[in-house]
Amino acid sequence: MKILIATIGTRGDVEPYVALGRALMASGHEVTICTCAHFEPFIREYGLGYAYVNNDFIDFMHSPEGKIILGNAGSFWETLATLAPMISKLGNLQERQMADVWAASKESAPDLILYHPKALGAPDFAEKLGVPCMLAFWLPMYVPTTRFPAMGFPELPLGPGYRWLTYQLIKSILSMMSKRVRKWRTQNGLKPRSPGLRMRLPDGRPIPALHGFSRHIIPRPEDWPETSIVTGFWFFNQAEDWNPPRSLTEFLSRGEPPVYFGFGSIFGRDPKRVTQIILEAVRRTGVRAILARGWGGLEPTDSAQSESVMFIEAAPHRWLFPQVTAVVHHGGCGTTAAGLLAGKPSIICPFFGDQPFWGRHVDRLRVGPSPIPQKRLTVKRLCHAIDVVMNDSTMRQNAATLGSRLRKENGTSNAVAFITQWMNNQRFHEL
């Protein structure tokens, strides 16, 4: 079976699909990932096919406007308010992105399209090609439930009606932002209304939805259709063929396990300020620390390196996190999952998007303290959080127990089994 995976975003929006793609490929399928050209070497490194999308999204996030979004965005509504003045520019970006994904869809001629919601138009391209599609995502945003509100909305004591309404509000907002999708559909002889908004295939059946998170963190709601599942996180072990630099192994062996600090490919308007806050908190709390620079993130100075502090470019989380005592990060799904998988407490300092959501779940499960939004990050708050994760034995045990449970899951295998079964049923349905 030929499978096209369409995704747009940062590395955190690509890496889980590489894990899923590798598992699908191991099951005999031909897999192509369609995403920004920035990630082509990473995708090909793991033997997967690559389909081109321009780097406009990546370039935008590095632009002054993109840094404003990262600096101002917090809740779902703050993000919308920050984006509003940029709608025209973002719309043109989306149109170019859609053109590339559509070209890749035609060229790859897939039997199935798996898509991230930011890959605008993917369900519509599947409809035009006459092939099925599946939502493959790690956030509860698109399949309504009365159990909890959609990601981005607060958990208010307003009952099941409120929770259900949050999903309808997301659908309404997306509908208002889908002018270009409707235009494309009309130009290509399809009815204006997108199946992606309705989460329905053209024949009226629900679009299957794979949710790549763990039931131990967010249990599957009983009122979801049987075509919506929780698989477990989509991990793969990048450490298998990785040789750590000698300087890193020597640093780890010289003393107590350090605290990890890293914000991945997310960056704010003032990374130097964040770096100085971290270094001062490390000095005051007396912990050893590893700071991962990431892509445009933490910025070392000549005076920052010391016997107790080490800067690195990056290291596979599956290799490094079991060797640290706690993980301080932005709260992206992948980094959150990796920290929890290692059984380590997390301090989440979110920028935007799903990061506050994962921060709240870490706090709710008592595997980390309350999240510290980047806009409120201070030396005092970070010192307090470090003291908590270092000294709260109950929190550390909770994290270890959750890590043990997560290590028994196999999210990619569960996803592959569901995809295979559903596609077999789909062929039967077509007979």
Image (tube, helix red, strand yellow):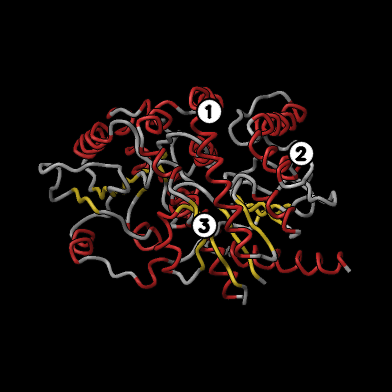
Q: Give the residue at x 70% y 52%.
A: 209
Amino acid type, callout 2: Arg
Q: Position of residue 253 (x, y in %)?
A: 21, 62
Q: Give the residue at x 62% y 67%.
A: 413
Classed neighbour count for the residue bearing mark 1: other residues with Cα under 10 Å, few (<14), some (14–19), many (≥20):
few
Q: CA distance from mark 2 to mark 1?
A: 21 Å
Q: Secondary structure at mark 3?
A: helix
Q: Is residue 303 left or right of residue 362?
A: left
Vertical comparison of 372 with 321: above or below: above
Residue named by callout 2: 193
Classed neighbour count for the residue bearing mark 3: other residues with Cα under 10 Å, few (<14), some (14–19), many (≥20):
many
User: Which quadrant would the N terminus be assigned to in this image?
Assistant: bottom right
Dot label at residue 87:
1
Q: CA distance from mark 2 to mark 3?
A: 30 Å
Q: Earlier in the sequence, mark 3 or mark 1?
A: 3
Q: Nearer the viewer, mark 2 or mark 3?
A: 2
Q: Position of residue 39 (x, y in %)?
A: 42, 57
Amino acid type, callout 3: Pro
Residue named by callout 3: 16
Residue 301 lies in what quarter of the image? top left
Q: Secondary structure at mark 2?
A: loop
Q: Nearer the viewer, mark 3 or mark 1?
A: 1
Vertical comparison of 72 with 49: above or below: above
Q: Give the residue at x 74% y 39%.
A: 145
Between 192 and 283, the one nearer to me in the picture: 192
